Image: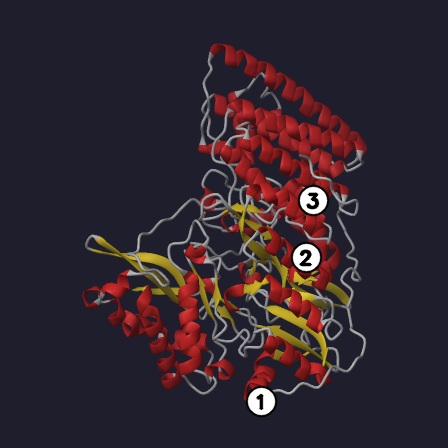
Amino acid sequence: MTLVLNENISKAAQKDILELQKKISQFKKGEIQEERFKAFRLARGVYGQRQLGVQMFRIKLPYGKVTGEQLTRIADVSEEYTNGNLHTTTRQNIQLHFVHLEDTPEMWAKLEEKGITTKEACGNTVRNITASPLAGIDPDEPFDVAPYAHAVFEYFLRNPINQEMGRKIKIAFSSSDKDAAFTYIHDFGFIPRIKDGQRGFKVVVGGGLGAQTFIAETAYEFLSEDKIIPFIETGLRVFDRYGEREKRHKARMKFLVEAKRGLGLEKFMELISIEQKANAHHSLNIDTGSVPVEIPKEQKAPEPDIKNKEKYKEWLQTNVLEQKQKGFYAIKIRLPLGNIHAGTARELVNLTKGYIADDIRITISQGLLLKFARKENLPYLFYVLDHLGLAEPGSESIVDITACPGTDTCNLAVTNSTGIAEELERMISSEFHSLITDSDIHIKISGCMNSCGQHMIANIGFHGSSIKNGSAVIPALQVVLGGGVDEYGRGFIADKVIKLPTKKIPEAVRILLKDYEAHSEEGEYFNYYYLRQGKMYFYNLLKPLGDLTALGGDDYLDWGETEAFVPEIGTGECAGVSYDMVGTILQDAEERLHYGGEALENGYYADSIYHSYSTFVITAKALLLSIDIQCNTHIGIIKDFAKHFDGGLGQDFEAKVLQINQNIPEPAFATDYLEQARAFFREALALRTVQALESEKEVISNYYKA
């Protein structure tokens, strides 16, 4: 049955939701292959979960902003369709787990009624745009970066140039040089600058975490504010055409920008200058009023009777900070493991309404940030938060550990992240309580090397692994040290130091912290201490814990488990499809033609041109696969097709396709380019008909991703 959608949902969102419902129905009937459907649902925020028969549904919240009404609707949807838990992430998203596939269109519709999308929350797209949670209230900021993050989000949502790239793209905006948004590990990072009275940004590109971590390189020390979206667009065009697609682990922007194995920054920037002509905009002004500052009206809160005065004092010290707006304070909420129950979220909205701005931010450390609290209302707000279990001191301190869901729900996880995180928080709180206020140490944990918990930018980090001991397998964590951002905004990538059984990790952290307390210099930052002592010092310090001959039965169990550890790693879903038939690929090309025609009719000339370009490339890819030519980049497809179909369809093919970066996106060229794509597609279909008569061969290939 087709959903009846609320009229206040945008036409574009209505189309997306109904299309998702249609594709789910086709998939259930066996009309769409599983891998092809996977690529489709991922780009709508529907991600496979470790448990069979259920999905994770990711909600895309640009720069982590959510209003009280929106958070209430997310809570309502979570209780109606899932287990009632809201999980916040290091990408400032909210994830709902244990979702049934057939419920996702209705869930999405209910979210869209409140202006919330899941479009492009997963898959090979521009992911959620992150920003410093303090954007707009940061005493150190030159200006509020939130409107810029918002503009980038709106511009690239549903933009054809980033719908089916080789891999995902992550973009971050920091509010100041302190780089609280970790721009240095992003594909595109922006740090605000003012030069000669003009707003702009320092721009970095090619950063990334994962199995191989790269620090982003500086593209511009200063780029004026009107040029940032055109720069991202041209960068995405280059990435889409030249980026790797066959080898998934090499398909990120960081490998394209790297000098040794990729283009190198200089060549990358050169290609960007070539692509600029095709942009829809060469300069695009940002509406700096798009994220209005919501200051609550002045009202006196009730006078609470605070029983635990010591806890209140520590909460003020660790969880409350003064904003740049005089007389107002921000409150940081620590969410253990990034989890908050739907009922608690609703109460939070109801009990704080009118005393804070209607602008809650999800933080990069998986917490929440409340803004514009008046000093006289802080006792009441503490009382309310304490009642909800949300007033634990130590937000964004050593005791506030970042952890991905690990083996609780993730297919890729090797070990349990949440169990060890809880154990470490208990141990640190009881044994090293002074470090909560007197140190700048952060601990982050990932269930695997892919770094969803951002362990490689932690002062002390861990990622899931295993150790063989004869025929037995021991759950283990790789210890990494020395990552993060120092007081000057310099980014560090952690070093892999030693792999230890997971049950030895609390003792490892205990040893590290005792050694730091005993041997660090007065006020010495942990990373400077690590660099001064050297990697081998810490390897030797922790090595005794890796003695396999001293292990007992409990060491063979992961945290929270009662049965012997068995590493069960599924297939991740961060990339698109892995196989398909030539005929199905041609159907994809035909779909792009349709989109190109729609865009042309509606006056979206740059979009139409890109759909036409995609038609050329996808059609050529299909025919190359039909003769067993592997495809791993768009530029490779273009060149190979010209070579292998020379004299026929391949004649002048490269020049024909690359007209896209030789012409500005105007009606005449958009119309002509679409007609050329249609003619090429018709000829390709005719050739494929001849091939089919000669052979009924089905192409199954990992190269479809190109």
* Nearest the eye: 270 or 351: 351
Mark positioned earlier in the residue sequence (1 or 2)? 2
Q: Nearer the viewer, residue 582 or 174?
A: 582
For mark 1, does the 10 Å Cα neighbourhood hold few (<14), some (14 to 19), or many (20 or more) residues? few
Residue 365 lies in quadrant: bottom right
Can the viewer see residue 221 in this picture? no
Q: CA distance from mark 1 to mark 2?
A: 35 Å
Q: Tell me the SS state at disc 3.
A: helix
Compare residues 112 and 151 and report the one nearer the observer: 112
Residue at mark 1 to residue at mark 3: CA–CA distance: 60 Å
Measured as percent of width and height from the top left, residue 349 is found at 68, 68
- Above or below, 518 relative to 188: below
Q: Identity of the amino acid at label 2?
A: Arg
- Where is mark 2, residue-wise? 73
Residue at numbered disc 1: 309
Q: CA distance from mark 2 to mark 3?
A: 41 Å
Quadrant holding the N terminus: top right
The answer to which of marks 1 and 3 sits earlier in the sequence is 3
The label number, if any, that marks residue 276 in the structure image: 3
Q: Residue at x 32, y 60 (%)?
A: 562
Q: Is residue 556 visible?
A: yes
